[in-house]
Amino acid sequence: MNMKSLREVCVVGTGMIPFGKYPDTTLAEIGWPAVKEAIAESGLSPKRIDAVFCGTALGGMLAGQRVMKTLGISGMSIINIENACSSSSSALSLAWLSVASGQHDVVVVIGVEKLTKFGGGVLPLEKEDWEVNQGMVMPALYAMRARRYMHEYGLTERQLAEVSVKAHDHGALNPNAQIRKRVTLDEVMNARPVTDPFTLWHCCPTGDGAAALVLTSGDVARRNDTKPVRIVASEVTSGLYTDGYRDMTWAELTARGAKHAFEMAGIGPEDVDVAEVHDAFTIAELMYYEAFGFCAKGEGYGLLSSGATSLGGKTPVNPSGGLLSRGHPIGATGVAQAVEVSRQLQSRAGAHQVEGALVGLTHATGGGIAGLDHGACSIHMFSR
Amino acid sequence: MNMKSLREVCVVGTGMIPFGKYPDTTLAEIGWPAVKEAIAESGLSPKRIDAVFCGTALGGMLAGQRVMKTLGISGMSIINIENACSSSSSALSLAWLSVASGQHDVVVVIGVEKLTKFGGGVLPLEKEDWEVNQGMVMPALYAMRARRYMHEYGLTERQLAEVSVKAHDHGALNPNAQIRKRVTLDEVMNARPVTDPFTLWHCCPTGDGAAALVLTSGDVARRNDTKPVRIVASEVTSGLYTDGYRDMTWAELTARGAKHAFEMAGIGPEDVDVAEVHDAFTIAELMYYEAFGFCAKGEGYGLLSSGATSLGGKTPVNPSGGLLSRGHPIGATGVAQAVEVSRQLQSRAGAHQVEGALVGLTHATGGGIAGLDHGACSIHMFSR
């Protein structure tokens, strides 16, 4: 990519609703308050919106149009993006390009999902995929990877449970989190089993949610009164589908995406002040510490237990509570992460503020259909 | 948009499968042959593919990843686009931008849909939308518009039926058409009624299909042996949602998009040699003649009956057979139109070739949820 010809892109508005279960609310009704908040924060007239990119995995046809119609804002380009758990982070990447390239000046990005429409916790995965047909649903996939990791690196169930304790410590401080309560190590250990070695508190909840951003060019942002947050890297990549052996303990897709994103941003893992990573299950967070280079391979638990990734540590990870506590309405997650990191870099994250954070990253990865590795991964880096 | 900083983008490869009903074939199996054909035509190594944009409206999660995994080509950016009937034309627009901006050099665009998975002809529209709940499904919406048009302009049912005759005359010549047979005016008039004034032959069929393109920058295209087709306009827009009266006989969304696209291409309707427009129902084709300025408002039938829009006429419209005859597997349509127009401009459309065509356009518009107007419209213009 020839970055020289691309413009600076900034986040100038953020919005989200508290994630949770809204079974009696339509997708459009879940989505519009987040968009309204983001537009209001931006201080820009809705008339200036050139385009809308809406990420949703299971929201049905024309989700973005339905949200914007409810707000009474229409007539611009509206495009909906699906990339499983990376749906709205992929939407963010396309929105970034549309501003960076000069195509648009003011763009809204939406992440919205309503999982309660499917009833209980079971998501409608693709029956065409033989892995899914054979039981390779997400909790099973991550459990396999956890068991292998425990075998390779001597991680215990009790140590793994500490990831959940940290996530809920953070989420308890976040008014937008779906699960706003602390859990103890014993509570995690003794909760009902899901897929060995995971109990319920090792797994992110399902639920509903919406989040939104307003992006503008640097020029427009600087004419504004807000504290713009620059997007310094935007990366989308897909898994390498291969037969045969692969290292289940190594998040190859994320590591590859992280390498590209760090190169694009011109920074390294040591420069990151705050990170929101895709902790759909406890083991994932440890593997992503390693994939981002926050620690060496196999040393994820050491980093966690040092306190470095907790609020107050060197590189707080998932100060929002992450997927485990803030929640994971699939298509909404990527933009919710970007809302969190933007607010962190603007020093307005409230009780879960990371003091002095100037550089942050978000990471959403999803799709189990490839068996061991994932279908899509999107990483963004931000700077004040 | 500041077009000066954008690069020239060319179609260098096209592929599609014959549209039809493939109930025993998975989405991935429908999709991959089209992609393989497009890559083979391009003469480029699959290793050079930087990104994939896959349009599908109802294909489920990670459709593009499933198609590319089946082909064994992965590890690049893959993003799925949903925009109802404009899904893959919106994907084309994003792919165009990614090349035009310099982000990517070689990009694959896919349109793929498998409607037979829903059984009979009924599509799963959004139950959240009150218009849908009140019966405002597509055949009803277009029938209302047809009746109003007939009232305003004195169009008869028999005249309207001529649109279907022309579509099937063209489609009978296209080996990729779903309905490869001529129909007579009496057959159209006497077919079973669907929504008055439409009989079955006034309505596009449902079915399955896939189509694909390879796009590159002009530089890459010129180093290649193929006959590149330049994309000279790429437009996506959304409907204006308003209460109260509006002119049902005027395709406002399409007219607005067409105006932008003509401005971007620097041409006018008189310059168009071939057009693929969104004739989901017979009346639509006449309204789109008018929206594109091929004739004045209310004069669509006059243009049709003059022969100008038939093969051999001044501006053949839907030489492929259009949605009525080639078929309309929702998300696949936009890219199928682009495949058709690209091949027309390369003088290799076979029995339905438009002689000497140098400039063409495609038009896909969709989503009935806004009641009278549509959710998304995407227009592309091409030139040799």
Image (cartoon, coloured by chain):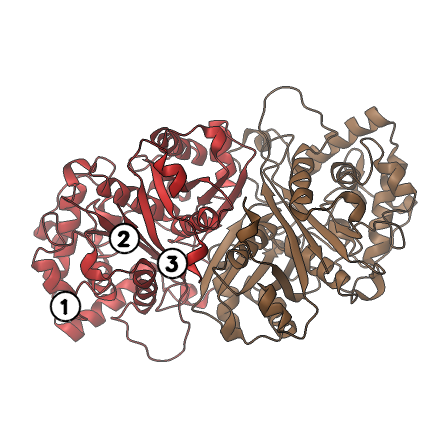
Chain colours: A red, B brown
> Residue at 73% across / 61% down in the picture?
B384
Q: Residues within 10 Å of mark 3 (few under 14, many from 20)?
A: many
Most distant residue in the bottom direction:
A244
Q: Residue at x 78, y 36 (%)?
A: B290
Residue B108, horizontal then vertical, whole percent:
56, 64
Sequence order check: which comes first, mark 3 or mark 2?
3
Measured as percent of width and height from the top left, residue A276 is found at 25, 51
Q: Residue at x 22, y 42 (%)?
A: A344
Image position of B149 (left or right of A204)? right
As helix, strand or loop, the secondary structure at mark 3 comes to: strand
Please state the chain letter of the residue tagged with numbered disc 2 in the rendered image: A
- Label 2 environment density (alpha carbons within 10 Å; few <14, some 14–19, many ≥20): many
**Can marks 3 and 1 be said to lie on one chain?**
yes
Three-letter code for the amino acid on which mark 2 is drawn: Leu
Residue behind mark 3? A235
Dot 1 amino acid type: Glu
- Chain label for disc 1: A
**Residue B359 point in image, percent of width and height:** 75, 54
* Residue named by callout 2: A361
Q: Identify the residue under disc 1.
A: A299
Label 2, label 1: how far apart the Cα atoms are: 20 Å
- Taking depth in this image into account, of A216 and A89 the one nearest to the observer is A216
Q: Is residue B162 above or below residue B114?
A: above
Q: Which residue is at 38% across, 68% downward?
A: A371
